[in-house]
Image (cartoon, helix red, strand yellow):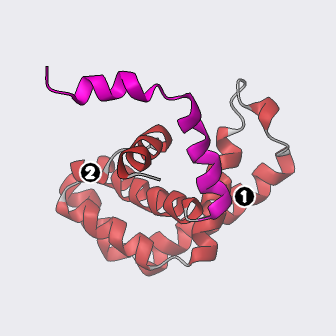
Amino acid sequence: MTRMKRCMAAALLTFTCVAACAGPSALALGKCLTDNTSGKERKALARWIFIAMAAHPEIKQLSAATPDDLEQASRATGALFTRLLAESCPAEMRAALQNEGAQAMQSAFSTLGQVAMQELMTDASVNAAIAGFERFVDGKRLEAIGSPR
């Protein structure tokens, strides 16, 4: 996949605040959160995000997730967030809240969510599914935009 196509795919899948808007305390908290989660935990977080998004009425029909699946994923996510904030990153959380407010928490957890989604996107099946939209992109129209007139 070309770099431009990867960027387009990533842009289509971005659903959280970009960490670039975060202050230093939010960045430190985001780093602490990602450093203190395993690949398995990040996949579980991505699973929760997927199931939660599948609750939307226009998406629900595309998922076989049950209310029990959501309950289990929510329970695991709640335990993960509690561990991260109470045990792994309490000093970073305190500093983020004091220095940058609630927005810092959102930004830090956006960073963790982005890392979780990136981890899923390294799978060949996921990459193939994401790349599937390329068949429907009108390359000639896009090339014309980038060409000097």
Indicate the amino acid at tag 2.
Answer: Gly
Nearest the viewer among 70 and 148 is: 148
- Give the Cα separation between the discs numbered 1 and 2: 27 Å
Numbered tag placed on residue 7 in the rendering: none
Residue 26 belongs to the span the image colors magenta: no
The image position of residue 39, as x and y in percent, is 58, 75
Q: Nearer the viewer, residue 102 or 139?
A: 139
- Residue range corresponding to the magenta coloring: 123-149
Q: Does residue 77 appear anywhere in the picture? A: no
Instruction: Identify the residue position indicated by label 1 in the image.
Output: 73
Q: Nearer the viewer, mark 1 or mark 2?
A: 1
Q: Quadrant of the C terminus?
A: top left
Horizontal relation, residue 74 to residue 26: left or right? right
What percent of the width, then of the height, locates residue 101? 26, 51
Q: Residue at coordinates 36% horizontally, 59% vertically from top-left?
A: 108
Q: Is residue 6 above or below residue 38?
A: above
- Residue at 56% across, 59% down: 121
- The answer to whether 51 appears left or right of 138 in the picture is right
Check disc 2 and report the residue beneath it: 101
- Could you classify mark 2 by the number of other residues whose Cα lies within 10 Å: few (under 14), some (14-19), or many (20 or more)? some
Residue 19 position, x and y percent, is: 30, 53
Q: Residue at x 14, y 26 (%)?
A: 148
Prevalent SS, magenta region = helix
- At label 1, the amino acid type is Ala
